[in-house]
Amino acid sequence: MIFVLYGLGFPVFAGAFEFADDTHGPDVISHPVGYTGLGEDLIVTVGISPSSPNALAMEVPVMNVIDTWNRLIPTTGNIKTNVGNIQRKQFDFESVALHELGHCVGLSHPNLASESGLFDEDKNFTRTTVGENNTFDLNSGVDGIVGSSDDIRGDDVNLHWFRKLDNNPFEIGDVVDSTTYSRNLSDLPFGDFFVTNGDRDVSALFGVQNTEAVMQQGIFSGETRRSLTADDVATLRLGMSGLDRLADTTDDYTLTLQYEGFTDAADITFNFDNQASFASCTFSGAFLNSNQNHFVIKIASISFNEDFLWFFNEELKPLASELPVTTIFVNNTSDTLTLGSGERLFLDVALDSGLSAGSQADYWVRASTPLGTFWLNDLLQFVESDEPVRAFGGALMDLPLFNILNTPTNGLPSGDYTVMFAVDDNMDGVFDGTFQDVVTFVISL
């Protein structure tokens, strides 16, 4: 594998939002081209330079990343390898384009990244300024995982907005604004020392595998990251809460990215012009109406370098389903299956949250077995109960594929098994099973 960092064009500013730094202040929130401080439906146009090399090959991936940012669906398991025909030494254009487009609408890296001047894993500590001692204080704490909640950061000034409820960058609530998110360490949950970021190694601490924020700098060749995580969605939604940083008030805005085709006249253009060492968004901005806490992007363009092996996805993303779709698989199939003695039993669930992404819901997994009824609890353990036991309560987010059981059939009694995966259309702790799927299998010993 070859590890290459995403580039960031000049001018470079640090923070979960661009322009948040020592110069402009740590509280700065940046907004896309055209925001005036009033409640509005903001449309930002995106195009491909018609003279660019790879112009035709870019079109489908660019349309896909526009759709991904417009949907704002939080997902887990977004790190994938061996997708389509991507080769080990190729870099996925769509994944990199998704990241760079995030920069061009005002989002920065949640980690310190290469612009910090640090190297290797030190770049994955959570975004800060250097503080009064003029140096980054870097200690990964007892768990040894960089970017986690027990990091010791001295007088470094945090720039990353975090969820006050649990400091979890992989979950999101109904309300995203300054009442639910903060960058002040005094708002951290009890026992947390510092703000976590959406790094792939940190995700495992929250029971989420193969997940990394799109805005986290760095990607491996041969892998894709084509969907957003909760941290990506929350950061953009925080900006959309407007100047007062409160949701559902008159200064809120919505953001729609609009594809303009092959043109140099769009608000944001993609171009293989070799102006970047790898890929970068070059932008400028200004304070909004002399408001010292809000910047607006004025000019933005995205550059790519031809000297890398790029993979261009040719599959246009399908339209989002209106309602959530749940799926459950036994040994990679939804068909009825018979398993013998000594075979392994795998259960996986998938969820397409559709247009309901972000809505609060209850998640349930029920297994009807020869031994009785079992429910998956929040520790991912099946427990016997005649009453429903909830597996999870929180925002609906896309689950491409999530393993809930991996066990040999030895010790399981012969007979018929039926397992249901369901989500509700609310989060009240009461089993409704509004959207559900079942799979059946037989164990024959």
Image: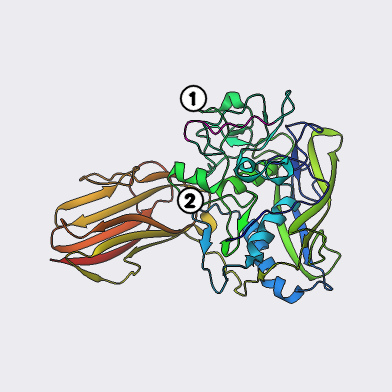
Q: Give coordinates of residue 365: x percent, y percent.
A: 32, 52
Question: Looking at the picture, does residue 411 appear above or below residue 20?
Answer: below
Instruction: Note whether residue 108 is visible.
Output: no
Q: Does residue 169 appear to the left or right of 115 in the view shown?
A: left
Residue 366, given in percent of the width and then of the height, sits at: 28, 53
Q: Quadrant of the N terminus?
A: bottom right
Classify 426 as above or below 82.
above
Q: Is residue 223 left or right of residue 44?
A: left
| Snapshot quadrant of residue 86 | bottom right
The percent position of residue 43, horizontal first and vertical second, equals 76, 56
Position of residue 121 measured from the top left corner of the image (x, y, whole percent): 60, 43
Q: Camera-side residue: 253 or 408?
A: 408
Which residue is pictured at 53% across the width and 37% down the height?
148
Q: Is residue 72 magenta?
A: no
- Name the mark on residue 362: none
Asked which quadrant contains residue 174, the reply is top right
- At label 2, which amino acid type do we have? Leu
Q: Tell me what residue is drawn at x 72 percent, y 26 percent.
A: 131
Mark 1, other Cα within 10 Å: few <14 / some 14–19 / many ≥20: few
Q: Is residue 251 left or right of residue 73?
A: right
Distance Cα–Cα, label 2 vs label 1: 26 Å
- Predominant SS along the magenta part: loop
Chain part drawn in magenta:
136-143
Q: Nearer the viewer, mark 2 or mark 1?
A: 1
Q: Which residue is mark 2?
A: 396
Of labels 2 and 1, earlier in sequence is 1
> Which residue is tagged 1?
190
Instruction: Look at the numbered disc 1 and give the secondary structure of its residue.
Output: loop
